[in-house]
Amino acid sequence: MIQRLDQTNKIDKSEYIILNIDIIPISSDPIFSGFIHIKDGLIYDFGKNLDQSFLSEPYKIPIYDGSSYKLIPSFINSHTHSAMSFFRGLGCFLTPNTSKNSSMIENFLFPAEKSLTKEDVEIFSYSYLIDGIKTGTSCFCDHYYFIEGVANTMETLGVKGVIGETLCDLGGSFITTQDDWTKIKDSIRNWKYSSRIEPILSPHASDTVSSSFLKQIVDFSRSENLGIHMHLSQTQGERQRTLKKDSLSPVEFLAKCGGLNSKTLLVHMLSADKNDLAMVKDSEATICLCPSSEMIYESAPTELLLDSGINTVLGTDCAASQDSANIFNELKTLSLLSKRYPSSDYLDASCVLKTVTTVPANFFNLNCGSIEVGKSADLTYIKKDISTTLDFEKNIESNLIFSSNDRFVEHLSIEGRFILWNKQITTISEKSVMDEYQSRFKRIAKHCGFMEIK
């Protein structure tokens, strides 16, 4: 008997087939009422018509009817600070500061972060990562202090991660000493985490990292074949400080230090000009946009960025400026922004979806981001209902962006293992971390004078 996927218990088999499911592969055309065969964590086969030998009873492997679902590759969130969930609901109500000399980062974030410990980071990360899972994300690129705390939480939840310790020797919440840098290099060379978690190097920004330290980071990235994930031109303040410090724009500064190349991910680029973007394009580096967050920090030069032709990925940033880890919101926001400008690259829904699937998968060298034979079974199951069920071949991808949202995310698998089932996290009890989360949040809030906590 073929069981309905929406009426069965969580699948816990290493091999299974789902029939009659609408598939959005990203790398190829959508398939309506197709099938997918998962085996040992990988996509073994998929398509329109299943080999009939599998349908002869008794069934060789479990088969489920997925007619109530759309299937998409799980999203890749290319820029997060998941532990900053303790800022949720605070940053968006601050008065924007567009001064060239300071911003919310210097005036609000840095002082509060000084209160953090590794244990805080581990507990606070649960909130943002769980939010991301429930909104269809399986992989997070996280750049923060005490990154081992984030890694521990990722391991417990079962998600994938690309993680980097924040590196800064001129400013920021915690200064990276040479002893710290030696320990970070040793931890990367002796990586202790599972194959789901990979390292990346994360210099903070052009105004918080000296040229001598950045050159060390770049040299290490080359020797260990590691990518670089860096805030760059995030604010006008950063641009002005870098011009004063080095007589170079942030992009020029990174290029002079040897770090502008195809393995570099530049986050934000809000104060970049046409010359900067031309340099980035020539270098084959990738830009990460966080549209919702950037509207709070400063107005992003969207037209310049969308017309640049540079590889682009999406992130949600942090809960200080973007209270949700919901990639659906960023997809819709970017799509709406793109429609203000005649940019052919971003008017197409398929191109927008690639910013959270195939493009970041290629950049981070991940075996996921699309539905293809041999790819990791990192998949999100979108429940159909009367408001989203009517799709045509020409609009199923745009409907995913404009009509679907996180409330339709019902199941999510990573390497074929379901870490979200019926909207519930399967790898940990949320209640088990809630009390400690609230206790630590109250301590930070009281220390920083955020607000009265009842």
Image: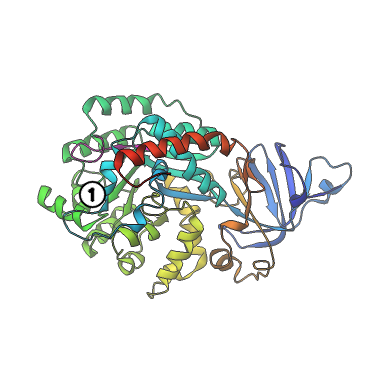
Name the residue located 24 percent from the left edge and 24 percent from the top edge: 179
Q: Position of residue 434 (x, y in %)?
A: 52, 38
Name the residue located 49 percent from the left edge and 39 percent from the top edge: 126
Quick one: 435 or 236, which is closer to the camera?
435
Quick one: 22 or 92, which is closer to the camera?
92
State which quarter of the image contains the C terminus.
Answer: top left
Span highlighted in magenta in the image = 163-174
Mark 1 crowdedness (10 Å alpha carbons): few <14, some 14-19, many ≥20? few
Q: Position of residue 86 (x, y in %)?
A: 40, 43
- Asked whether residue 362 is in view, the answer is yes
Quick one: 299 or 358, which is closer to the camera?
299
Amino acid under label 1?
Asn
Hey, which quadrant is residue 94 in on the image?
A: bottom left
- Asked whether residue 226 is in view, the answer is no
- Residue 15 magenta-highlighted: no
Q: Position of residue 397 (x, y in %)?
A: 57, 65
Q: Which residue is mark 1?
A: 107
Q: Tag count in the figure?
A: 1
Name the residue located 77 percent from the left edge and 50 percent from the top edge: 7
Question: Relative to residue 416, is residue 355 depicted above or below?
Answer: below
- Residue 169 magenta-highlighted: yes
Q: Position of residue 238 (x, y in %)?
A: 20, 52
Quick one: 51 or 2, which is closer to the camera?
2
Question: Relative to residue 12, is residue 246 depicted above or below?
Answer: below
Q: Is residue 130 left or right of residue 345?
A: right
Name the residue located 42 percent from the left edge and 55 percent from the top edge: 314
Name the colour scheme.
rainbow
Judging from the image, what secondary structure is the residue with disc 1 in?
Answer: helix
